[in-house]
Image (cartoon, rainbow, N blue to C red):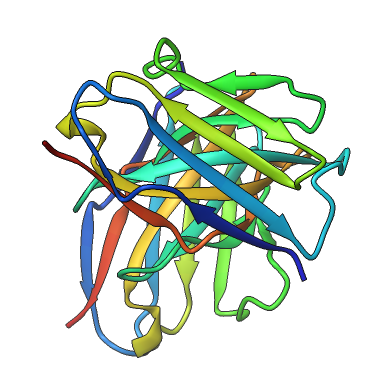
Amino acid sequence: QLQLQESGPGLVKPSETLSLTCSVSGGSINSSSDYWGWIRQPPGKGLEWIGSIYYSGSTYYNPSLESRVTISVDTSKSQFSLKLRSVTAADTAVYYCARIDTGYADMDVWGQGTTVTVSS
Amino acid sequence: DIQLTQSPSSLSASVRDRVTITCRASQDIGKFLNWYQQKPGKAPKLLIYDASNLETGVPSRFSGSGSGTDFSFTITSLQPEDIATYYCQHYDTLRITFGQGTRLEIK
């Protein structure tokens, strides 16, 4: 059974870079039928898609975050990663990774989420 | 960019009630709409994909319908465990958009 697990620092200082990794287990990150994505949820607010990556390395970003975001994949480690630069308090959120089906773009497997707080 | 507008933003209903949430797209999106349930402190859970297809293992009291710009999500007989926030989600030109969510409470 496919499982995703986010990892990374829970506290990041303003203006620094937020870095998270999602580890994929119980399945292949090389699947041609899947994308891998990052979604975040600020406290008390709704879901925001950050971006997605295909195993080949093709990336797709939310235009509102594109200038600050890099998503990468390491197929040898079955991991994909998120870097968000120049963070502010507005980037404080629960960050989720998820599998995205290439057909319907539905996200059927999610990590448990990791809370990242931006504060000095 | 396509916008998704859910209504209502919040809803209070009684156990065994029929509950309907709507999601309106800013332009024709065919049937490319998915629905999720999110309980407090948990990751979202996929319930419906491609507007009307029930995800495996999801109870049959949940259903979805619609195409084009107008979509609906229905719980035919509300159960206490259905208390959650529900989101619609669309995918277009490699970009993903969520509705703002509908918070469902028990009356």
Residue B42 as seen in the image, left or right of residue A32: left
Query: Where is residue A108 shown, x and y percent of the image?
Result: 65, 58
Along the line of sight, the residue nearer the viewer: A105 or B63: A105
Whether residue B28 is visible, yes or no, is no
Give residue A81's quadrant in the image.
Answer: top right
Give the x, y percent position of residue A67: 41, 10
The correct choice, above or below, for A49 with respect to A23 in the image is above
User: Relative to A115, is A53 on the left or the right?
Assistant: right
Question: How many marks are shown on the rendered structure?
Answer: 0
Q: Quadrant of the C terminus of chain A?
A: top left
Residue A42 is at least partly visible in this image: yes
Percent from the top left, x then y, of residue A34? 78, 42
Residue in the picture at 84% in, 52% down: A28
Q: Is residue B24 left or right of residue A92?
A: right
- Quick one: which residue is furthest to the left in this view? A120
Residue toward you, A102 or B55: A102
Residue sitting at 72 percent across and 42 percent down? Answer: A104
Residue at (51% x, 33% y) in the render: A82
Q: Quadrant of the N terminus of chain A?
A: bottom right
> Camera-side residue: A82 or A93?
A82
- Residue A10 placement (x, y as % from top left): 31, 51
Q: Nearer the viewer, residue B68 or A90?
A: A90
Residue at 26% in and 62% down: B103
